[in-house]
Image (cartoon, rainbow, N blue to C red):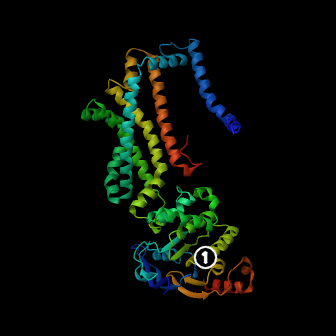
Amino acid sequence: MPILNVVELKKVFRDSKRGDVVAIDDFNLRIRKGEFVSIVGRSGCGKTTLLEMMAGLQKYDSGQIFVDGNLVSGPHQDCGMVFQEYALFPWLTVKGNLEFGPRVRGIDAPTRRRTVENLIRMVGLHAFAGHYPHEISGGMKQLVALARALANEPKIILMDEPFAAMDPQTRESMQRELLKLWHQTGETILFVTHNVEEAIFLADRVVVMTARPGKVKREIAITLPRPRDDGLRMSPQFHELEDSIRRMI
Amino acid sequence: MKNDNSASVIRRIVSLLTKRNAMKIGSPVALICLWEIICRLGFVEPYLLPAPSIVIATLIRLLVNGELLPHIVASLSRALNGFVQGSVLGILAGVLVARFRIVGDMADIPLQALRAVPTAALVPLIIVWFGLGEASKILIVAVPCFFLTLINTMTGVRNVDALVIKAARLLGAKERHILFKVIIPSAAPMIFAGLRLGVTVSLVLLIIAEMVASDRGLGFYILESQRFWSVEKMFAAIVTMSLLGLALDRIVLLVGNRLLVWRRGKTLGS
């Protein structure tokens, strides 16, 4: 059974003045447990809408979304989400941010503490546990956001262009860090980006989306060997993939 | 160990001796000296403008002989009572108005209209309704505190980052968590800015109320001293007022900066 199963999903934005816009139409996607899938597509093709529907933050007009076999009908904790703008709680320390999910879900204090300490160590931020978000770099903030999502032990992590605002060096090191965490945790990740290179480098499978209505145009299996390092970006195989996907968008 | 401590204390004292601090302290000291000199040289009649040294001497005398004490106690208790009650209600109302659209819509026009009325205009009415006792004075302080914290809380709550609320909801936060763990902390800087405004404005209103209808309090004392043409007593009471206002403002600021430590570098100001 797939962890995420999206069946014939349709979303229409109603607008009485300018006419309705079909944002997503006949969208199908299955993701297996432990898989890393990237979605690429032009901005405005409904990627964010798609993720928000999976997380239960937006309603859809027809079709179904199942997360671990459960039909999504409202906000739920099986999807962890990471946003481009971090969306950290500025009044909580790094540790406090990580603890937020388990705390509101009523997890007992010792378990909570163990989870949070493990995660802080895993993302390498133990020296910054007591820092506030404005005191750490953008890359660190995104690691905190990722760890905060992981603290809830979600079935799948949805990432909405999480590295889009970063400089190329930070971006590449964040990609390596993300792959390392993915290997360590065995999480399932759905990663939305408009950067083709990033999509290929990270994923087992790249889903190319068309815009208006947003639909799956093509799915490309990425069979490049793992673990992946930066040298891979230079390989002819990588460039070939990059070229062919770029042409599809 | 002890040497280390004393060394660090000395370092801290030395670090305070900056040019900016010298300016900050130097300018009021210079102003007071100038005032003293003008009075000593006899440029103004002492019954119109007493020298600072006389004001300070008078203040100390009034404090020692207990003449001022009941008035300070009366004013302070009214200010604190009104401030706390008005602010607490203002914060509650601000959250309600900002979070519930029905409440917000119903309150919109009345709020705009009431905001435009200076509370001073309500003083005679409040006295007619609530009499000459403590209740009316506390209410006169509470009303501006209520409106200032209400408006600021409302603005703060409405400006909470929608994405942060979204993130909280995805992490499993229920409505009460969203309110107490996201909205209130996020709006706290605005709420504290409202509280600080409240302190200042409420003292103004309190003095007016005490001058209009009271037999105690610093406002009454200033008016009473005027009747006896005792300018140095008026000054002593004014200085006391200023110190009280300063102290209350510092307390709010201190509590605020302590609670808002996460905004280090962006404190409420000084």
Mark 1 — residue? A182
**Chain ID, mark 1:** A
Q: Quadrant of residue B115?
A: top left
Q: Compared to A21, does B201 lie above or below?
A: above
Task: Where is residue B160? Give x, y as percent.
Answer: 47, 58
Q: Quadrant of the N terminus of chain B?
A: top right
Q: Secondary structure at mark 1?
A: helix
Q: Is residue B38 visible?
A: yes
Q: Compared to B265, does A70 lie above or below?
A: below
Task: Where is residue A116? Give x, y as percent.
Answer: 55, 64
In the image, A17 versus B55, the foreground residue is: B55
Residue drawn at 36 percent across, 37 percent down: B81
Q: Compared to B69, does A141 lie above or below?
A: below
Q: Quadrant of the C terminus of chain B?
A: top right
Total marks in image:
1
In the image, B267 versus B140, the foreground residue is: B267
Residue drawn at 57 percent across, 20 percent down: B35
